[in-house]
Amino acid sequence: MASKAAPAADQAAAAYSPAEMMAAVAARELANGEVVFVGIGLPNLACNLARALQAPDLVLIYESGAVGAVPERLPVSIGDPSLVTGSLMVCSMADVFQLFLQNGKIEVGFLGGAQVDRWGNINTTVIGSYERPKVRLPGSGGAAEIAIHARRVVIISRLNARAFPAEVDFLTSPGQRCRGRTRTELGMPGAGPIKVITDKGILENDPESGEMVLTALYPGVAVAEVKANIGWPLQVRPQLGLVAPPTGEELRQLREVLDPKKLFLG
């Protein structure tokens, strides 16, 4: 007996991967001419995708010291030689943080972490207690500085209940509320994490409470599916948005130009 064709919804879902969706959604966050502090992984893909499509004059700054980088291929690390050729300048890591980040020149910073809580606080230090951790993580690096000083921060992270607890085990990089205190009370100049791009939808901080709420879903995803992977009673915006899937050109750039070997897309 011939097998039945997959439903249209299943065919659409199989047309792109969660990583491709996240990279495309993150790229759409960036406007032409913005100054972005770039990480490695999906943020790196997203920034270079945006530069290839709607934001050719995006200013990419890498932690290693490459400012205004225009890599001809996707860099595989912050120390990739492709970042140097054609860049506006190459400086020390200290200069990147002091002259650009702490001076308020970074408009967008991308971050991720092992845990993200309801206020957008990020943990990249330990799972469990600090004194006797179950897992010891790499630590902050420059993430805490980015979370404090960048004009706005976008978090990219896959949803699961362990990664999205009500409160992080260790507060590495500050979100909208840190142990009950607001960013304004703590004197932080940047807006902090305003959006979390996941593999199922988008969370954004509520302007009044500071709490992350569900504002948009990806095609084929139900609200219940998102709530099942969140460790707090997730609030849902009444006018819930639906995020458009990756376009054919976005997928072509990701698959054929930027990451044909699937180093970051898996």
Image: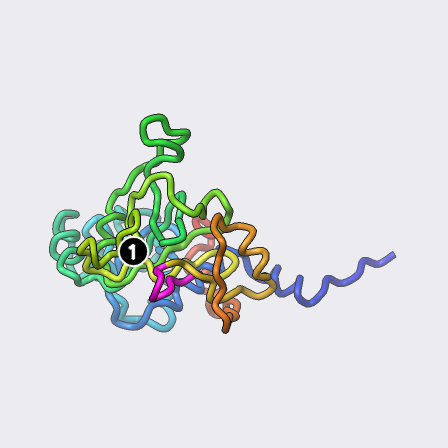
- Which residue is located at x 66 percent, y 62 percent? 10
Judge by depth and name the residue closer to the eye, 27 or 227: 227
Asked whether the viewer can see residue 247, the reply is no
Q: Secondary structure at mark 1?
A: strand
- Where is 256 relative to 165, above or below? below
Q: Of all residues shown, which one is farthest toward the front? A: 180
- Which residue is located at x 13 percent, y 59 percent? 103
Q: Of all residues shown, which one is farthest toward the top? A: 132
- Where is 8 relative to 162, above or below? below
Q: Quadrant of the N terminus?
A: bottom right
Image spot of residue 243 (x, y percent) = 50, 69
Classify 10 Å Cα crowding around label 1: few (below 14), some (14-19), many (20 and above). Answer: many
Please say which color scheme the image uses: rainbow
Judge by depth and name the residue closer to the eye, 181 or 190: 181
Asked whether the viewer can see residue 184, the reply is yes
Query: Where, by quadrant of the figure, is residue 156 drawn?
Result: bottom left
Q: Is residue 45 left or right of residue 93?
A: right
Q: Of all residues shown, which one is farthest toward the right? A: 1
Per the rendered image, the range of residues in magenta is: 202-210
Q: Is residue 238 left or right of residue 73?
A: right
The residue beneath circle 1 is: 38
Image spot of residue 252 (x, y percent) = 48, 65
Image spot of residue 265 (x, y percent) = 47, 52
Q: Amino acid at mark 1?
A: Val
Q: Is residue 177 left or right of residue 215?
A: left
- Which residue is located at x 29 percent, y 43 percent? 172
